[in-house]
Image: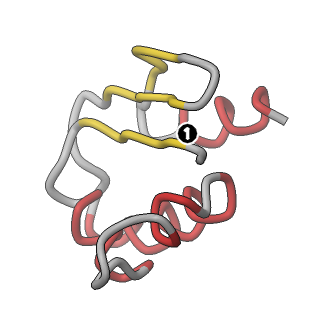
């Protein structure tokens, strides 16, 4: 459930910043470290497949991992 997601994301320092019926945004104090980015991307994809399935044409778990290594905002949505 959502509580499990919060617990997992807390290991990266991610805190929920905004939420609606179909969107969730986390803020992080720093980007995910390079060595943890792929694991974080797999977890996010498992929780929110739309982040890749409904994303840009070139969206992959690897591309998401690259974003997580550079960004302090995680934006998730469900269509």
Tell me where residue 18 appears, x and y as whole percent: 43, 15
The quarter in which the N terminus is drawn is top right
Q: Is residue 2 left or right of residue 18?
A: right
Tell me where residue 8 appears, x and y as whole percent: 64, 42
Residue lying at the far right in this picture: please name it: 1
Q: Quadrant of residue 78?
A: top right
Instruction: Give the residue pinned by disc 1.
Output: 9
At x 32%, y 26%, the residue is 27
Q: Is residue 52 left or right of residue 67?
A: right
Tell me where residue 47 appears, x and y as whole percent: 67, 53
Q: Nearer the viewer, residue 46 or 40?
A: 46
In the rendered view, tell whether residue 11 sits above or below residue 66: above
In the rendered view, tell whether residue 68 sits above or below residue 62: above
At x 52%, y 72%, the residue is 53
Q: Is residue 48 left or right of residue 18?
A: right
Count residues near mark 1 (Cα–Cα under 10 Å), then give few for <14, some for 14-19, many for 20+.
some
Q: Nearer the viewer, residue 77 or 18?
A: 77
Instruction: Count numbered badges in the picture.
Output: 1
Considering the numbered disc 1 on the image, is that residue within a helix, a strand or a loop? helix
Display coloring: secondary structure
Residue lying at the far front in this picture: please name it: 79
Tell me where residue 30 appears, x and y as whole percent: 21, 38
At x 36%, y 41%, the residue is 74
In the rendered view, tell whether residue 65 sits above or below residue 58: above
């Amino acid at each position: 459930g959502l509580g499990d997601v919060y617990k997992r994301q807390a290991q990266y320092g991610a805190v929920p910043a905004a939420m609606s019926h179909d969107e969730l945004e986390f803020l992080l104090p720093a980007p995910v470290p390079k060595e943890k980015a792929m694991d974080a991307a797999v977890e996010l994809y498992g929780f929110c497949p739309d982040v890749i399935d409904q994303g840009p044409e070139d969206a992959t778990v690897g591309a998401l991992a690259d974003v997580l290594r550079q960004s302090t905002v995680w934006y998730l949505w469900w269509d």
